[in-house]
Amino acid sequence: MVAKWLMLGLLLVISPLVKGQEINPTYDLHRIHFGFSIIGNYGKLKYNTASDFMDNDTIQTINTNSFPGFGVGGIMNLKVAEYWDFRTMVNIQFVERHLQYNFRGGDIQTAKVNSTYMEIPLQMKYKSKRNHNKRFYWVGGATYRYDFASDIDTERSNTKPIVALYPATFSYDFGAGLDLYYEFFKFSPEIRISNGIGNSMVPDSFIYSSSLSRMSPKLIQFFLHFEG
């Protein structure tokens, strides 16, 4: 079954690259297109330790562990010039990240920083000239995210390994992709990097958060866009 799906995906990518008649030549004459996206992600955390971290006698090191996640979304693309588009989306993404605290004496505690994001990216898309049934593109912009799974209101203590992020965050994004034209739709695989802006960590006096001075989320995202 997996082999069949991989073969289908391979055919989906390769078929527009095979030289032949141009498919759907009037697609780009339409100013607005709508579609949906299937999203894979890999969440990371960027952090700085507190200025007195090296002087503490409890925590030896802090490590981050990243895990794959997924999401879905809707997309609206507006043509503003021959090679420029404005694009926005409404996505739901599930992201998993862990902070591992290695204590002196061998004890290990893990703070799970998981998120369920509703996000709205606002992006500009620059496209190369269409070459037969394909064209490359680059995207850049900003994203607003709201985390419904934020631990901001969760009770915390030195015995509960919890590090909370504020639910509302912003990021700047950049990425690249490939538009592939088909008879009834356009398929676009894309990779995008999303870096959180500012310090997103909720401060508290307990050891897990007080060992850090700042933290912001980062996402490596893989999109499969389908636009009609």
Image (cartoon, helix red, strand yellow):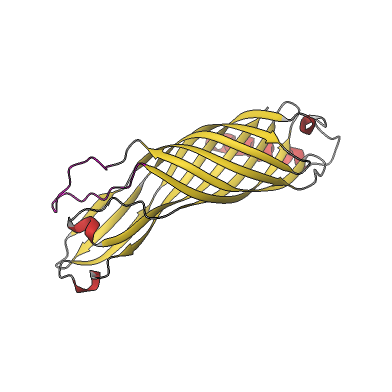
| Outermost residue to the right | 21
Q: Position of residue 200 (x, y in %)?
A: 36, 51
Query: Closest to the observer: 1 or 80?
Result: 80
Number of labelled discs? 0
Q: Position of residue 62 (x, y in %)?
A: 28, 63
Query: Closest to the observer: 24 or 162?
Result: 162
The reply, left or right, for residue 149 in relation to residue 84 is left
Q: Position of residue 152 (x, y in %)?
A: 27, 43
Query: Closest to the observer: 97 or 29?
Result: 29
Q: Residue at x 58, y 47 (%)?
A: 141
Please state the extent of the stretch shown in magenta in the rendering. 151-167
Q: Position of residue 1 (x, y in %)?
A: 53, 33
Vertical relation: 105 (above or below) 136: below
* Residue 228 is one of the magenta-drawn residues: no
The reply, left or right, for residue 205 in relation to residue 83 is left
Q: Residue at x 57, y 41 (%)?
A: 122
Image-quadrant location for residue 155:
top left
The reply, left or right, for residue 140 in relation to residue 182 is left
Q: Residue at x 18, y 70 (%)?
A: 56
Q: Quadrant of the C terminus?
A: top right
Which secondary structure is most common in the magenta stretch? loop
